[in-house]
Image (cartoon, rainbow, N blue to C red):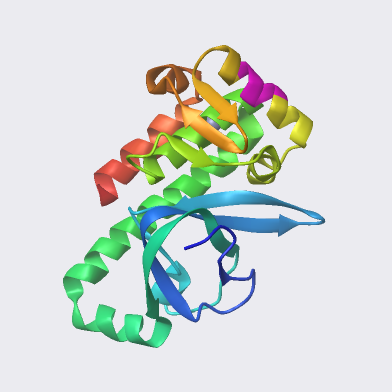
Amino acid sequence: MCVGDLQAEQNGPFSHVLFVEVGMVSVVNHIGKGSIEVGTIGNEGMAGLSVFLDDGIATSKTFVQVPGSGLRIPSADFVRIVEERPALRHLLNRYTHAFITSIAQGAACNLSHQLDERCAKWLLLTHDRVEGADTFPLTHEFLSNMLGVRRSGVTVAAGALQDAGYIRYSRGNITVVDRKGLEGAACVCYRFIRSHFDRLAG
Ligand SMILES: [Zn+2]
Protein backbone atom coordinates (compact mmCIF):
# COMPACT_ATOMS: atom_id res chain seq x y z
CA MET A 1 0.00 0.00 0.00
CA CYS A 2 1.56 3.29 -1.13
CA VAL A 3 0.31 6.82 -0.38
CA GLY A 4 -2.49 7.72 -2.78
CA ASP A 5 -3.26 4.14 -3.89
CA LEU A 6 -6.85 4.39 -5.06
CA GLN A 7 -9.31 1.77 -3.84
CA ALA A 8 -12.32 3.45 -5.47
CA GLU A 9 -13.40 6.83 -6.81
CA GLN A 10 -16.50 8.48 -5.38
CA ASN A 11 -19.43 6.89 -7.30
CA GLY A 12 -17.06 4.31 -8.80
CA PRO A 13 -17.00 0.53 -8.27
CA PHE A 14 -14.93 -1.39 -5.75
CA SER A 15 -13.15 -4.03 -7.86
CA HIS A 16 -11.76 -5.45 -4.63
CA VAL A 17 -11.95 -5.02 -0.86
CA LEU A 18 -8.90 -4.29 1.25
CA PHE A 19 -8.13 -5.53 4.75
CA VAL A 20 -5.50 -3.17 6.16
CA GLU A 21 -2.66 -4.82 8.10
CA VAL A 22 -0.44 -1.75 8.56
CA GLY A 23 -1.17 1.84 7.50
CA MET A 24 -4.39 3.75 6.98
CA VAL A 25 -7.01 4.35 4.31
CA SER A 26 -9.01 7.58 4.04
CA VAL A 27 -12.65 7.87 3.01
CA VAL A 28 -13.29 11.32 1.52
CA ASN A 29 -16.34 13.07 0.06
CA HIS A 30 -16.04 15.83 -2.53
CA ILE A 31 -17.98 19.00 -1.78
CA GLY A 32 -17.79 21.53 -4.61
CA LYS A 33 -14.08 22.14 -5.31
CA GLY A 34 -13.02 20.86 -1.90
CA SER A 35 -13.20 17.60 -0.06
CA ILE A 36 -13.51 16.43 3.52
CA GLU A 37 -12.65 13.17 5.18
CA VAL A 38 -15.63 11.28 6.57
CA GLY A 39 -13.84 8.19 7.84
CA THR A 40 -10.57 6.31 8.24
CA ILE A 41 -9.77 2.60 8.08
CA GLY A 42 -6.87 0.82 9.75
CA ASN A 43 -6.27 -2.75 10.85
CA GLU A 44 -9.58 -2.76 12.75
CA GLY A 45 -11.56 -2.92 9.51
CA MET A 46 -11.78 -3.06 5.75
CA ALA A 47 -12.16 -0.75 2.77
CA GLY A 48 -15.10 -1.66 0.54
CA LEU A 49 -17.99 -1.98 2.98
CA SER A 50 -20.47 -1.31 0.16
CA VAL A 51 -19.45 -4.68 -1.33
CA PHE A 52 -20.31 -6.30 2.00
CA LEU A 53 -23.63 -4.39 1.92
CA ASP A 54 -24.59 -5.93 -1.45
CA ASP A 55 -23.89 -2.86 -3.58
CA GLY A 56 -20.27 -2.47 -4.62
CA ILE A 57 -20.40 1.25 -5.53
CA ALA A 58 -18.23 3.59 -3.46
CA THR A 59 -20.16 6.67 -2.35
CA SER A 60 -16.86 8.22 -1.17
CA LYS A 61 -13.37 8.36 -2.64
CA THR A 62 -11.28 5.72 -0.85
CA PHE A 63 -7.48 5.78 -0.95
CA VAL A 64 -4.35 4.96 1.06
CA GLN A 65 -3.22 7.84 3.25
CA VAL A 66 -0.55 6.22 5.44
CA PRO A 67 1.57 3.59 3.62
CA GLY A 68 1.79 0.01 4.83
CA SER A 69 0.41 -3.37 3.81
CA GLY A 70 -2.94 -5.07 3.39
CA LEU A 71 -4.83 -8.01 1.90
CA ARG A 72 -6.71 -7.35 -1.33
CA ILE A 73 -9.56 -9.68 -2.24
CA PRO A 74 -11.54 -9.40 -5.52
CA SER A 75 -15.09 -8.27 -4.72
CA ALA A 76 -16.78 -11.36 -6.22
CA ASP A 77 -14.52 -13.69 -4.20
CA PHE A 78 -15.15 -11.67 -1.04
CA VAL A 79 -18.95 -11.97 -1.44
CA ARG A 80 -18.64 -15.74 -1.79
CA ILE A 81 -16.31 -16.00 1.23
CA VAL A 82 -18.74 -14.02 3.42
CA GLU A 83 -21.68 -16.21 2.34
CA GLU A 84 -19.75 -19.30 3.43
CA ARG A 85 -18.70 -17.88 6.83
CA PRO A 86 -21.46 -16.61 9.15
CA ALA A 87 -18.90 -15.72 11.84
CA LEU A 88 -17.17 -13.35 9.41
CA ARG A 89 -20.51 -11.76 8.51
CA HIS A 90 -21.22 -11.26 12.21
CA LEU A 91 -17.86 -9.51 12.74
CA LEU A 92 -18.33 -7.29 9.71
CA ASN A 93 -21.88 -6.39 10.80
CA ARG A 94 -20.42 -5.08 14.06
CA TYR A 95 -17.60 -3.26 12.26
CA THR A 96 -20.16 -1.63 9.93
CA HIS A 97 -22.11 -0.40 12.97
CA ALA A 98 -18.90 1.08 14.48
CA PHE A 99 -17.98 2.73 11.17
CA ILE A 100 -21.44 4.32 10.77
CA THR A 101 -21.23 5.52 14.39
CA SER A 102 -17.90 7.24 13.70
CA ILE A 103 -19.28 8.95 10.58
CA ALA A 104 -22.34 10.22 12.48
CA GLN A 105 -20.20 11.55 15.34
CA GLY A 106 -17.80 13.11 12.84
CA ALA A 107 -20.65 15.04 11.19
CA ALA A 108 -21.77 16.37 14.57
CA CYS A 109 -18.14 17.15 15.50
CA ASN A 110 -17.49 19.18 12.34
CA LEU A 111 -20.40 21.48 13.23
CA SER A 112 -19.78 21.71 16.95
CA HIS A 113 -16.11 21.60 17.90
CA GLN A 114 -13.07 23.85 17.51
CA LEU A 115 -10.41 23.14 14.93
CA ASP A 116 -7.62 22.43 17.45
CA GLU A 117 -9.85 19.88 19.25
CA ARG A 118 -10.76 18.22 15.95
CA CYS A 119 -7.12 18.22 14.88
CA ALA A 120 -6.16 16.43 18.13
CA LYS A 121 -9.02 13.96 17.65
CA TRP A 122 -7.94 13.23 14.09
CA LEU A 123 -4.31 12.67 15.12
CA LEU A 124 -5.41 10.28 17.89
CA LEU A 125 -7.65 8.27 15.56
CA THR A 126 -4.76 8.07 13.08
CA HIS A 127 -2.35 7.09 15.86
CA ASP A 128 -4.74 4.26 16.81
CA ARG A 129 -4.97 3.09 13.21
CA VAL A 130 -1.17 2.92 12.75
CA GLU A 131 -0.69 1.20 16.09
CA GLY A 132 2.92 0.80 17.11
CA ALA A 133 4.09 3.78 15.07
CA ASP A 134 4.45 7.14 16.84
CA THR A 135 5.63 8.82 13.64
CA PHE A 136 3.63 8.85 10.44
CA PRO A 137 3.85 10.90 7.23
CA LEU A 138 1.42 13.79 6.97
CA THR A 139 1.61 17.13 5.20
CA HIS A 140 -0.32 20.20 6.33
CA GLU A 141 -2.01 20.18 2.93
CA PHE A 142 -3.20 16.64 3.54
CA LEU A 143 -4.38 17.45 7.04
CA SER A 144 -6.28 20.52 5.79
CA ASN A 145 -8.05 18.37 3.20
CA MET A 146 -8.88 15.81 5.86
CA LEU A 147 -10.30 18.41 8.24
CA GLY A 148 -11.98 20.42 5.48
CA VAL A 149 -10.33 23.72 6.43
CA ARG A 150 -7.75 26.12 5.00
CA ARG A 151 -4.12 25.13 5.33
CA SER A 152 -3.35 28.25 7.40
CA GLY A 153 -5.91 27.14 9.99
CA VAL A 154 -4.26 23.73 10.26
CA THR A 155 -0.85 25.37 10.69
CA VAL A 156 -2.17 27.34 13.67
CA ALA A 157 -3.93 24.32 15.23
CA ALA A 158 -1.00 21.93 14.73
CA GLY A 159 1.39 24.66 15.92
CA ALA A 160 -0.56 25.01 19.17
CA LEU A 161 -0.40 21.23 19.74
CA GLN A 162 3.32 21.29 19.01
CA ASP A 163 3.93 24.29 21.33
CA ALA A 164 2.12 22.36 24.08
CA GLY A 165 4.58 19.49 23.56
CA TYR A 166 1.95 16.94 22.42
CA ILE A 167 3.29 16.43 18.88
CA ARG A 168 6.36 17.21 16.82
CA TYR A 169 6.10 18.13 13.15
CA SER A 170 9.11 17.82 10.89
CA ARG A 171 9.60 17.38 7.15
CA GLY A 172 6.13 16.06 6.49
CA ASN A 173 6.14 13.68 9.46
CA ILE A 174 4.01 13.93 12.61
CA THR A 175 5.34 12.37 15.81
CA VAL A 176 3.04 11.83 18.77
CA VAL A 177 5.21 12.84 21.75
CA ASP A 178 2.64 13.04 24.55
CA ARG A 179 -0.35 10.79 23.91
CA LYS A 180 -2.08 11.66 27.21
CA GLY A 181 -1.70 15.37 26.52
CA LEU A 182 -3.17 14.92 23.05
CA GLU A 183 -6.13 13.05 24.54
CA GLY A 184 -6.71 15.97 26.89
CA ALA A 185 -6.68 18.40 23.96
CA ALA A 186 -9.15 16.42 21.82
CA CYS A 187 -12.93 16.91 21.90
CA VAL A 188 -15.15 14.26 23.52
CA CYS A 189 -15.74 12.73 20.08
CA TYR A 190 -12.43 10.85 20.19
CA ARG A 191 -13.38 8.96 23.36
CA PHE A 192 -16.90 8.34 22.02
CA ILE A 193 -15.69 6.90 18.70
CA ARG A 194 -12.91 4.89 20.33
CA SER A 195 -15.19 3.33 22.93
CA HIS A 196 -17.66 2.12 20.31
CA PHE A 197 -14.88 0.66 18.12
CA ASP A 198 -13.48 -1.12 21.18
CA ARG A 199 -16.94 -2.44 22.07
CA LEU A 200 -17.95 -3.53 18.58
CA ALA A 201 -14.73 -4.38 16.80
CA GLY A 202 -12.07 -4.57 19.46
ZN1 LIG B 1 -15.65 16.62 18.24
Image point (38%, 19%), residue name: 180
Q: In this view, does 128 lie above or below 87?
A: above
Closer to the camera, 1 or 24?
1
The image quadrant of residue 114 is top right
Residue 83 at x, y = what percent?
25, 82
Residue 127 versus residue 28 in the image, above or below:
above
Q: In which quarter of the image is ligand 1?
A: top right
- Residue extending furthest toward the right: 33
Q: Residue drawn 17% across and 69% down?
A: 87
Q: Which of 174 and 38 is in front in this view?
A: 174
> Residue lying furthest front in this view?
171
**Residue occupying the far top of the picture:** 164
Quarter of the rendering containing residue 73: bottom left
Number of disc labels: 0
Query: Is residue 141 or residue 60 the one in the foreground?
Result: 141
Whether the magenta-drawn stretch holds residue 70 is answered as: no
Q: Which residue is drawn at 56% across and 79% down?
A: 13
Residue 29 lies, in percent from the top left, at 65, 57
Q: Which residue is drawn at 39% across and 45% down?
A: 130
Question: Which percent across, then down, holds residue 74?
Answer: 40, 83
Vertical placement of 162 versus 66: above or below?
above
Find the magenta span and give its range. Answer: 156-160
User: Looking at the image, is 10 positioned above or below residue 98?
Assistant: below
Which secondary structure is most common in the magenta stretch?
helix
- The question of residue 159 being in magenta is answered with yes
Left or right: 39, with 22 as reference point = right
Instruction: Inspect this view and state whether residue 53 appears.
Output: no
| Residue 33 is at least partly visible in this image | yes
